[in-house]
Image (cartoon, rainbow, N blue to C red):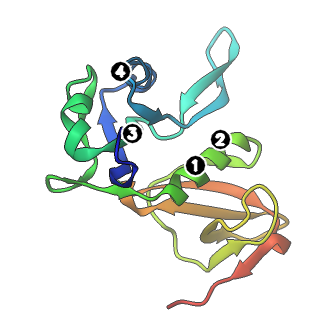
C-alpha cells in the first residue's frame, strides 16, 4: 500500500506536441497525471475547426512519490525533465491543481495564458466557480481581467470575472 503522505504534484516538461501522448502513457503506466486542456477554434486558409489544446504547452502534471516514481516518469517517452530549481523538482500545491481544474471546466471565462505577473491589485474571488481563487487584476471595465499565477511553474492564466465578485487583498 502506497504511503499517501509522500504523494505530491510535480510538473514535467515534455517534447513539443507530446503532451497528450505523455498523459496517455502515464495513464497506461498507472501514474496519476493531469493535463489541462481547452477547446478552441483554429482558423486555416480553407476551414475553421474546433480543436483541443493544452493550457500550458510542454507541461504535464504528475501526482507521485518522487523518491519511488521519479525514474518511471523520466523513462516515459517524450518526457524531458521535471520543472524546478536546479535539480530539485518544484512541488505544486493541491490548491493550484484544483484551480487549473476549475479553469478548464469554465472555458468561457478563459482568455489566454500569460508568462508574467502584470502589476496590479491582488484580489480573491468571493463567489461562483472560481470562489477563493486569488490573483492579480490586470484590466478594469465591465469585466475585470484577472491573472492567476502559478509560481511553481512560472505560468499564469488570464480570466474574465465581474468586479463585484472580487475582494481586495492587502499586501503582507
Report helix, strand or loop for mark 3. strand
Q: Which residue is depicted at the point 55% across and 28% down? A: 53
Q: Tell me if residue 140 comes above or below residue 25 in the rendering.
A: below
Q: CA distance from mark 3 to mark 4?
A: 12 Å
Q: Which sits earlier in the primary sequence, circle 1 or circle 4?
A: 4
99 over 75 or under it: above or below: below
Mark closer to the observer (1, 4): 4
Q: Which mark is residue 62?
A: 3
Q: Quadrant of residue 80?
A: top left
Left or right position of 140 against 25: right
Which secondary structure, mark 4? loop
Q: Is the C-beta separation of discs 2 and 1 under 8 Å?
A: yes
Please state, as top left, top right, bottom left or bottom right, where the N terminus lies in the image. Answer: top left
Residue located beneath label 1 in the image: 100
Mark 4 surroundings within 10 Å by alpha-carbon count, few (fewer than 14), some (14 through 19), many (20 or more)? few
**Dot 2 or dot 3, earlier in sequence:** 3
Q: Residues within 10 Å of mark 1 (few under 14, many from 20)?
A: many
Q: Is residue 46 left or right of residue 13?
A: right
Q: Mark 3 or 4, which is nearer the eye? A: 4
Left or right: 100 as drawn, with respect to 87? right
Indicate which disc, 4 or 2, sits on the residue closer to the N terminus: 4
Dot 1 lies on which element?
A: helix
Q: Pointer 2: what residue?
A: 104
Residue position marked by numbered label 4 in the rendering = 29
Of residues 9 and 43, the one nearer the viewer is: 9
Please say if 162 is above or below 22. Answer: below
Where disc 2 sits, the SS reads helix
Amino acid at each position: 500500500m502506497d504511503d499517501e503522505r509522500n504523494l505530491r504534484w510535480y510538473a514535467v516538461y515534455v517534447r513539443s506536441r507530446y503532451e497528450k501522448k505523455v498523459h496517455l502513457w502515464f495513464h497506461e503506466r498507472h501514474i496519476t497525471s493531469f493535463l489541462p486542456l481547452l477547446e478552441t477554434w483554429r482558423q486555416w486558409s480553407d476551414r475553421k475547426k474546433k480543436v483541443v489544446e493544452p493550457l500550458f504547452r510542454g507541461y504535464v502534471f504528475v501526482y507521485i512519490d518522487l523518491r519511488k516514481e521519479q525514474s518511471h516518469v523520466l523513462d516515459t517517452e517524450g518526457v524531458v525533465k521535471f520543472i524546478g530549481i536546479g535539480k530539485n523538482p518544484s512541488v505544486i500545491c493541491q490548491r493550484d491543481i484544483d484551480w487549473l481544474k476549475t479553469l478548464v471546466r469554465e472555458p468561457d471565462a478563459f482568455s489566454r495564458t500569460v508568462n508574467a505577473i502584470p502589476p496590479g491589485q491582488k484580489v480573491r474571488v468571493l463567489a461562483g466557480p472560481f470562489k477563493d481563487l486569488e490573483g492579480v487584476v490586470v484590466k478594469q471595465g465591465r469585466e475585470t481581467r484577472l491573472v492567476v499565477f502559478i509560481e511553481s511553474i512560472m505560468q499564469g492564466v488570464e480570466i474574465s470575472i465581474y468586479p463585484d465578485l472580487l475582494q481586495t487583498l492587502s499586501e503582507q
